[in-house]
Image (tube, rainbow, N blue to C red):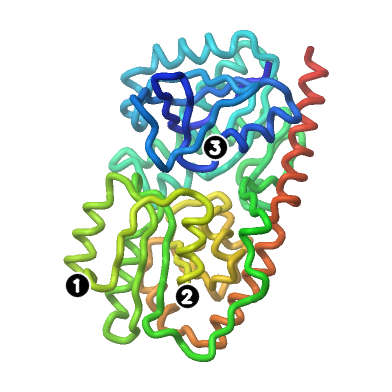
Amino acid sequence: MITIGLEYRFLRDTTGRVWAKTQCDEAFWRKYTEVLGNINIVARIREVSEKPEDYLRSDGPGIDFKGIRDYHGPASFLRYIFPVIGDIVSYTKDSSLLILRTPGLIENVMYLVARARHIPFAVEVVGDPQEVFANNGAGGRVAPLYELFFTSMQRWMCRDAEVVSYVTGETLQKKYPNSAGREHAVSDVYLPDEAFLPEPRHFKKLPSPLSMVMVGSLEVPYKGVDVALRALSKIKNYVNATLTIVGDGVLRLELEAMAHSLGLQQQVRFLGALPAGEAVRKELRQADLFLMPSRTEGMPRALLEAMALGLPALASRVGGIPEVLGEDYLFTSEQPDELAALLMLLTPEKLGKMSSENLQTARKYHLSNTTRAHREFLREVKALMAENK
């Protein structure tokens, strides 16, 4: 049996069905079962009376969820560390191989268990913990300690793994190499045919208002919505622009108050969470420019979905973003002045050029290409499992 660990929070209703808010639905896990057979998934699970409207079914044939206590952040994790470790030890005792989707606390514990019990393991790197804690995204006053711990754990995990996949083409590989050189570039972005615009957009003049859009969770400050708001406040007297924010979370009220304090209440719209897929694509089609002022990213799905619809984009220079956007369209994280300057320099010609380049780049992440790369990684995992029987 293969056991997969990830830092994600699922919901389980009274009938035992498991639900996910984003791409970790049954179709996502089916990519694993089609190659590996039955799998166990170790993650946080919160019990609910009924699932919210925008959640997707996650469980299915061959997919068995093993719930960990629903802690919130490292401090909460430490309060429940012994029952969490006990659960992980129990859930992995019959595993022939582990897959760790890092970064995350659960994966760190599973790595230590694997080393102690000599269980072979593979790693899927989907983000960079150094950026999470270094760029004011999380951790508060103890962020430097968290950064050191999580970065070191991910470096050791990747070094010792049997095989590693990375959501980037080269960025994360350089920071977290595998000692055996068994590395795969495997984006976790899967863009189907309907996600693409047939041809680039054309701009005869600069749109007025310039309709900008962001997509991301407001549960944590990683997406840099505050940076976008500050940038918009700097150009509001020079550029007629609006900003729609798709996403929800505990930070929404704080960000709405910030928009009001900056005098942007007429220019900023908080739309809330939308179901993945067509509902989000509808907002992207209506926009003129996509913004991603993130403090950390792996290979951002929202950005590539926007690019697949020919949407021009400006983004921060973090994670795998520089692999898909040219340097002329990037700015430094935490620097609203740089974003504001890029917005002031937009022209119809530049928007048209961005649209064409983005659509061409996004085609590399078509479902057929990313699925093929993921299958190659999983086949190597399966071969390793056979060797260790």
Which corner quadrant holds the N terminus? top right
Mark 3 vs mark 2, CA separation in Å:
29 Å
Check residue 263 in the rendering and tell me which mark sits there, or answer none: 1
Q: Is residue 280 above or below residue 62?
A: below
- Tag 3 secondary structure: loop
Please provide percent x and percent y for residue 316. Answer: 47, 63
Please provide percent x and percent y for residue 70. Answer: 37, 24
Q: Which residue is mark 3?
A: 24
Which corner quadrant holds the C terminus? top right
Image point 55% across, 76% down: which residue? 328
The numbered mark, 1 or 2, whose residue comes first in the sequence reads 1
Q: Residues within 10 Å of mark 2 (few under 14, many from 20)?
A: many
- Disc 2 residue type (three-letter): Asp
Front residue of 12 and 342: 12
Q: Which is closer to the viewer, label 3 or label 1?
A: 3
- Tag 2 secondary structure: loop
Q: Is residue 75 above or below residue 55?
A: above
